[in-house]
Image: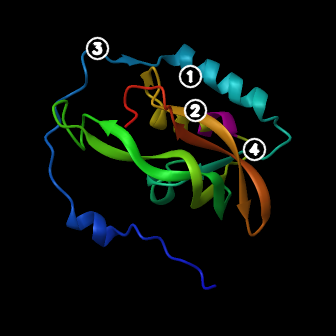
Amino acid sequence: MPPRTMSLTEELVARCFRVVEDSGPDPNAMHLDDADYDAMLDTLEAELPGSEPLWLFGYGSLIWKPEIDHVEERVAVARGWHRSFCMKMTRWRGTREQPGLMMALDRGGQCKGVAFRLGDADRRQQLDKVLRREVTLKPTSYHPRLLNLSSDGGTLRALAFVINRKGTPYA
């Protein structure tokens, strides 16, 4: 069977683009602080020893805008997870009255994406950078989770951000 190409293209996104005025941050939102990020980093580092490479799985904007320093990338598949427009957004993609939807990784199916291997020398710093980009509010919309991925180079374990199904943004 020939390789499949991703169905979601820039052209399709451009066809449905609409400008949504930013209503500003939710005044009731609680942002994570440095202590929260340090605790998350400590937990993740305990789950992934320094002797094991740290991979990050990109399935959406991380693919074309990773914003982290990495030393390798591989096309990879997460089995048991799929992309889904399942996260309600009240800023940038929608309003409080009419939430928009953003793609997140949800259970079931499979998802093809890109795995980025972080360098060993500054992995905590790079991990902190991506956590602060992807996980900003309490309670979190995403759970950082280690997934097993398949790639042409073999199986690897990677950090992915999966939807928090118990969170209020879950659609």
Which residue does the numbered mark 4 point to in the structure image?
A: 120
The CA span between labels 1 and 4 is: 19 Å
Q: Amino acid at mark 3?
A: Asn
Tell me the residue that label 3 is attached to.
Answer: 28
Is label 1 in contact with label 2 (beta carbons under 8 Å)? yes
Q: Residue at point 75% right, 44% down?
A: 120
3 vs 1, front mark? 3
**What is the magenta segment's predominant secondary structure?**
helix
Please name the amino acid that badge 1 sits on.
Answer: Tyr
Residue drawn at the location 70% of the way across and 24% of the way down: 43
> CA gap, disc 3 to disc 4?
38 Å
Q: Quadrant of residue 42?
A: top right
Query: Is residue 74 visible to us here?
Result: no
- x, y (%) of residue 87? 38, 39
Which residue position is annotated with label 2? 128
Q: Is residue 162 above or below residue 38?
A: below
In the rendered image, the residue lying farthest to the front is 108
Magenta highlight on residue 106: no
State the extent of the magenta-drawn residues as a range. Answer: 122-126
Q: CA distance from mark 1 to mark 2?
A: 7 Å
